[in-house]
């Protein structure tokens, strides 16, 4: 076998190996790159809250669609509007791509003293159509935050002012109304856009 034949054989072998690798990559199961997925989805506790239209919002309201739950408040100066704008952008991209369910964005207020249904209605509308704002008594909100391991705490700023520290997590509830997965923090458009279709296809 001369040198030319050897080179051709090596190139052909490399091409075959490359094609095989590419085919394996295409068929390999996709995995989330940033999200955490619970070993088994967890049912939510019973709770009774109100949505932005002052209608009852309970655990049954989180059935029938994929939901992205974010605990925040309308007076939040940075994390909340930034996160909601990012979720809105990802949601719009999923709509334009088609082929995957489009999750609903649900803002659950951790500041019910100021976040009335009317205030939430105006706020969630800034981030697109179909979003839901939820408020209610602190006792009912705490039922849900405890079940989902979400931290929040009122912080006194003096002179009658306060803010609310809270987790930046975005939690995913499946169509059966179960806590399925989530994103802990440092959210990026690329990670959310990659992981959400993977998560929703796992059902």
Image: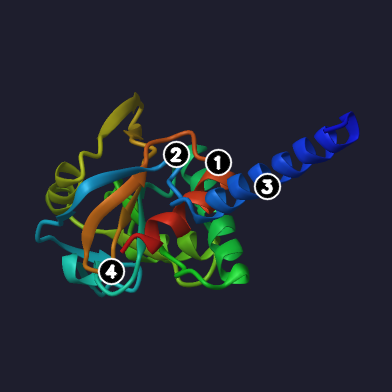
Q: Please report the residue visible at 66 percent of the width from the left and 49 percent of the height from the top.
A: 19
Q: Nearer the viewer, mark 2 or mark 3?
A: 3
Q: Is residue 14 left or right of residue 33?
A: right
Q: SS for tag 1?
A: loop
Tell me the crowding category of disc 4: few under 14, some 14 to 19, or many 20 or more residues within 10 angstroms, Cα based.
Answer: some
> Relative to 167, does residue 72 appear above or below in the rendering?
below
Question: Observer-nearest residue: 122 or 101?
Answer: 101
Q: Nearer the viewer, mark 4 or mark 3?
A: 3
Q: Please report the residue visible at 30 percent of the width from the left and 67 percent of the height from the top.
A: 51
Q: Separation of disc 4 and disc 2 at Cα? A: 21 Å
Sooner in the amino-acid sequence: mark 1 or mark 2: 2
Q: Separation of disc 4 and disc 1 at Cα? A: 24 Å
Read off the residue under disc 1.
188
Q: SS for tag 4?
A: loop
- Residues at marks 1 and 2 touching, judged by CB atoms closer than 8 Å: yes
Tell me the crowding category of disc 1: few under 14, some 14 to 19, or many 20 or more residues within 10 angstroms, Cα based.
Answer: few
Q: Nearer the viewer, mark 3 or mark 1?
A: 3
Sooner in the amino-acid sequence: mark 3 or mark 1: 3
Read off the residue under disc 3.
16
Q: Which mark is residue 97?
A: none
- Residues at marks 4 and 2 touching, judged by CB atoms closer than 8 Å: no
């Amino acid at each position: 076998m001369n040198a030319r034949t050897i080179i051709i054989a090596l190139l052909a072998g490399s091409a075959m190996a490359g094609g095989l690798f590419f085919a394996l990559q295409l068929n390999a199961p996709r995995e989330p790159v940033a999200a955490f997925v619970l070993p088994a989805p967890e049912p939510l506790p019973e709770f009774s809250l109100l949505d932005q239209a002052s209608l009852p919002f309970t655990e049954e309201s989180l059935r029938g669609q994929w939901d992205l739950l974010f605990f925040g408040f309308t007076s939040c100066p940075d994390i909340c509007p930034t996160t909601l704008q990012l979720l809105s952008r990802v949601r719009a991209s999923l709509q334009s791509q088609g082929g995957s369910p489009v999750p609903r964005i649900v803002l659950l207020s951790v500041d019910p003293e100021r976040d009335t249904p009317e205030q939430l209605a105006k706020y969630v509308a800034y981030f697109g159509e179909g979003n839901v704002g939820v408020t209610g008594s602190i006792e009912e909100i705490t039922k849900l935050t405890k079940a989902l391991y979400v931290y929040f705490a009122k912080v006194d700023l003096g002179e009658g002012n306060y803010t609310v520290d809270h987790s930046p997590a975005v939690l995913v509830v499946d169509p059966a109304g179960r806590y399925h997965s989530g994103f802990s923090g440092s959210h990026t458009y690329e990670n959310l856009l990659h992981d959400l279709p993977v998560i929703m296809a796992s059902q």
